[in-house]
Image: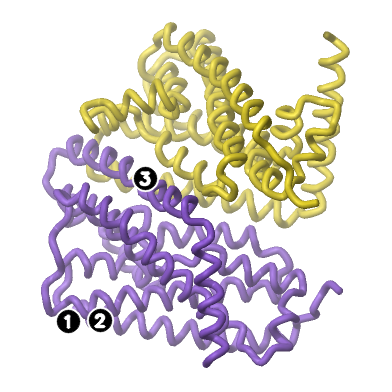
Chain colours: A purple, B yellow
Amino acid sequence: MRKYWQVFRISLADRFVYRTDFLIGTFLRFAPIVTTIALWRAVYAGAGREEIGDLHYGEMVSYYLIVMISRAFGSMPGLASTLASDIRDGNLRKFIVQPLNYVIYHLHLRMAHKSVYFVMAALPYALVFYWCRSFLPGWPAGELWPLCILSLVLSFFLGFMINMAIGLLSFWFMEVTSFMFIFMVSQYFLSGHQFPLTLLPDWLERSVTLLPFAYETFFPVMMLMGKMNAAEAGQVIAGQCLWIAILSGVVAFGWRRGLRRYAAFGG
Amino acid sequence: MTSVLGRYSRILLCFARNGLVRELSFRVNFLVTVVSEILWLGMMLVFVQVIFRFTRQIDGWSNHEYLFLLGTHFLISSIFEAFFFDNLQRISAQIRTGDLDFVLLKPANTQFLLSLERISYTAIANIPLGVILCVYSFSKLDVPLTFQHVSMFLILVCSGVMTLYSLMFMFSATSVWLIRQTSASHFWFYLTSCSKYPAEIYKPMVRGVLWFALTFVFPVLIVANLPANVMVRVFEPYLVAYALFIAVGLLLFSSFVFNWAMRKYRSASS
């Protein structure tokens, strides 16, 4: 366990190097929120109705704001492509010869990234949420608190496993970066990042929420918005656990099969 | 003068040939990238149709008018991505690693070399997608098709590309001061996520200040909105003059900013 703690610490230090860049980047990340507020105001005005897809205007804007929180947990920028390039360039060799599990190594790396991210992003997030407080629905009900936090933590693991699984495809296909773009685009929409899935026609919403992506963003966000009772929230948690279990199985299996094919290119 | 032009067009031709060779060595990649762009556009269309399930107009833009705007946006950003995006994205790395030295040493205009070295044929393949969306939505609208409209539209598309190019080029040039800044692709994402909607939606924000800033100070809103307006909504000749003025002005300004940044450039490594 000590070695993974070291991985965590080194990565932590590495992240603090580019502070200014980070702060600017975090504020920029909220820039699309401005467009969201503007666009949905126009849509609600044009539609002339109070609710669209069970959400009124303030809730719609909050949805996009809370998506940012959920993404802060679940998004894994560059994970799949790091794995892909390690496999393609033969870099993986370096890890295989060490008494270290590559997947668990990356899990710790990501936990360090996220820890730094939460510390440094806390201020910008707090400011943006403070400015937008008139839209927000208020804190989740007391008994839902633990479930909300648990569900965010689970989106971290779910996001990690989904990206790992995609990255592992590199064992079988030489050039997966373009597949990754397809995957990212699908994830962007299917997870409810682009719009709340409740806006879809019922049959489509039902089919899309069968996929793991909705458990990464859409369901946790609806929970945080207080749109669920304890029983529904429990179902979401169960669904997240189920998908994490399935995907961990896929990753473990794919990793073993992949290593057998692995040729360690480069010298 | 002609010899200068001849020299630069020969360089450009050489870049184009190199790009083609590179593209042809990754054929599957080409295909997959085109498919993913189609998917991206398709998803955007789904989003638009989802919105128009609930409303008939967004600040005066009907469904098909908005689709025309989206098509115009896609057309302009594909042209930009085809010729400039890959290049501008690499500039900050070139500055950080000191590879810029090799470009500075070459006996040709640095901005030219930096901006056009790699042509992306994949993005060129996306241009027809934008055209198809424009033609389709135009056919659904009851507006006259005249030579004047189309030529103004094309001029505005070009000036839109120039405007985008200048903004992105300036952004890349600032890497001299901000080593490892937020990557150009993120900046591009924010830019386009702002400019692909009707400009009118920003008017009620902060008492119109935001709309004013995004139209006149940091003019991303005119990029796709102006050509689409001219073609399917209102035809205002002065808008064309304004767009051209902005595009040329920004281009000159970007070159000024770049040269200024170059004075601060200190190479890296050995």
In which quarter of the view is residue B255 placed?
top right
Give the amino acid at mark 3.
Pro
Q: Residue at position x 49%, y 63% from top?
A: A16
Chain of the residue under the numbered disc 2 shown in the image: A
Give the amino acid at mark 1.
Ala
Percent x, y for residue B119?
73, 38
Asked whether the residues under the numbered discs 2 and 1 touch, taking CB atoms below 8 Å apart as contact, a structural biologist would say yes
On the image, numbered disc 1 is attached to which residue? A231
Let me know if residue B170 appears in the view: yes
Q: Comparing marks 3 and 2, which lies closer to the viewer?
A: 3
On the image, numbered disc 2 is attached to which residue? A235
Do marks 2 and 1 share a chain? yes
Q: Residue at position x 26%, y 33% from top?
A: B57
Dot 1, how many residues are within 10 Å of its Cα: few (below 14), some (14-19), or many (20+)? few
Q: Secondary structure at mark 2?
A: helix
On the image, numbered disc 3 is attached to which residue? A32
**Image: B149 above or below A137:** above
Q: Secondary structure at mark 1?
A: helix
Of the residues under marks 3 and 1, which one precedes in the sequence? 3
